[in-house]
Amino acid sequence: MESVIGALTRRKDTWLYVGLFCWISVGFTIGRDDYWEAYFHSLLALAGLWSPVLAVTWVREGSGEGRFARRNRMAWFGCFLGYLPLLLMLSAALLSPGRPIWPVVFAGGLSIAALECVLVVESQYFGRLYQVKWVRKLSLERAVLVSITGLALLLGAMAVSSLGNPLYHSGKQLLIGFEIHIFKIVTRFPTFLSYSLQLLIMYLAGYFFFYINSRWLVPRILKEQGILYYVLCSAALIGIFYPFWGQLLANLPLSKVLGDVFSTNPFVSENAFGVILVLAISLPVLLAIQWAKQNSLITSLKHEKSQAELDLLKQQLNPHFFFNTLNNLYALSLQRSEQTPESILQLSELMRYVIYKAKEPLVKIEDEVKYLRDYLQLQKIRSKRNLDLQFEEEIGDGTILIAPLLLIVFVENAFKHGVENAEGDAFLSISLKADRHSLRFTCENSFEPAPDAHTGIGLTNLRKRLALLYPAKHRITTSAGDGVFVAGLEIDLL
């Protein structure tokens, strides 16, 4: 079930298109008596003729790469810059009342183009926008204040543009029409400023209660005192301030121009009800933001805790590795082998990898494989017995990134508890298969059970690291029998 949920979560863009098709189909049922038949006919037409869009999106999201990555680029261009415009032009040419399918297809094509543009902009540019310093510092209160200021200026321009137009402006009332005339705004610029300022004051009345709700009622009263105190304090806030704001808004000249939108009696219940609406509408938004902040803090603390534990495990791992390598060097010096200088050089390469590469969170899998081969070559040199060594690898892309020093633990364990303890000839068979989706590693070696055998800190640390680096995305298996020990590791890399 977890794998199914994970697969569906990764394909969120596909489900956006499916939802889009459903909404378009809903739109074409309006005014129809056979609504279910119309709905399914529209949905089948969209899913059938626009199936390449679903297929390309599904495959692209399954690959774990972006829409403009090497493997997905041609399919994306062919679908959205080839098939989409062609089918749009065809459906536009075939639009007619006697062919109800083509309006559905045409509307679907326009909607797909719009949604894909939004998704492309979001994936390519929104991440950069979030890195801008002033954007990251933009709080909800500031964003709302900027929005109402812009809205006041827009409505002020529309109000001035509606002056003198008999459709909107009579002798007793001005209706704000959806039109903007630059000439009227320039020639009546003081009126434009006056209207915009008065509209801003109207919005600031609601902003006043929203700000207190955001800064005091929700974080201080609701969070610390509970819902009862929140309701009582909200009622007290409304009772204290709403008559004064009502009187201020009623005295605005624009209120009379617009037809006395605010009552001359500031104590009317409509004013209090408006404040209640502001608090009620802003409450779920503020609670969601509070939850997001708390969740972000928890996630950050978990990350810091995990990073501290990983650093501690690496500090334990490095001395463990150096202890093994010093033993190797000591054994070679006792043998007075001519390969000792070469072995020392290989040891230095291995140590360099551990010291520098292991500090990185992820390394290329080809670097990890080279490290394994250097280690195996060094072990073959110092081995006192015949060793049948096999290393098979199937790697789709050498630039696949994995956490460093995961695979070497199995190999070290195979030599320490298997190969070196063998009474006769020993064997070691290693298999590594990896692609963008997963990694599968198997280590099979000869095995002689010892009464005082123990796993050591290598495998113990490995299990802890995997739990931190790939939670719920890895599986370790071990089995022993008939003188053979088999260890396997599977990691979901997506």
Image: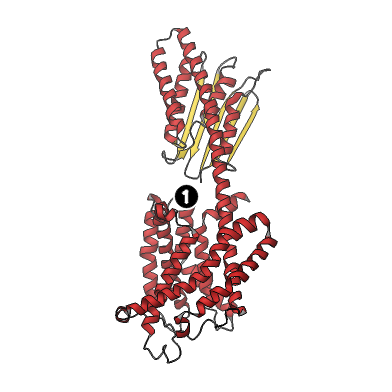
Instruction: Please say if 161 is above or below 81.
Output: below
Residue 460, image quadrant: top right
Query: Residue 426: where, in percent of width, then height?
Result: 55, 19
Task: From the image, tell me which residue sits under label 1.
Answer: 64
Give the image quarter of residue 281.
bottom right
Left or right: residue 65 versus residue 230 is left
Give residue 370's position: percent from left, percent from top: 42, 29
Estimate how packed mark 1 is, as few (under 14), some (14 to 19) or many (20 or more) residues with alpha carbons within 10 Å. Answer: some
Q: Which residue is drawn at 42% across and 76% down?
A: 155
Q: Which residue is drawn at 42% across and 63% down?
A: 118
Tell me: 265 left or right of 129.
right
Image height of 490 relative to 344, above or below: below
- What percent of the width, then of the height, locates residue 349? 41, 23
Mark 1 residue type: Gly
Looking at the rendered structure, the secondary structure element under dot 1 is loop
Quarter occupied by residue 476: top right
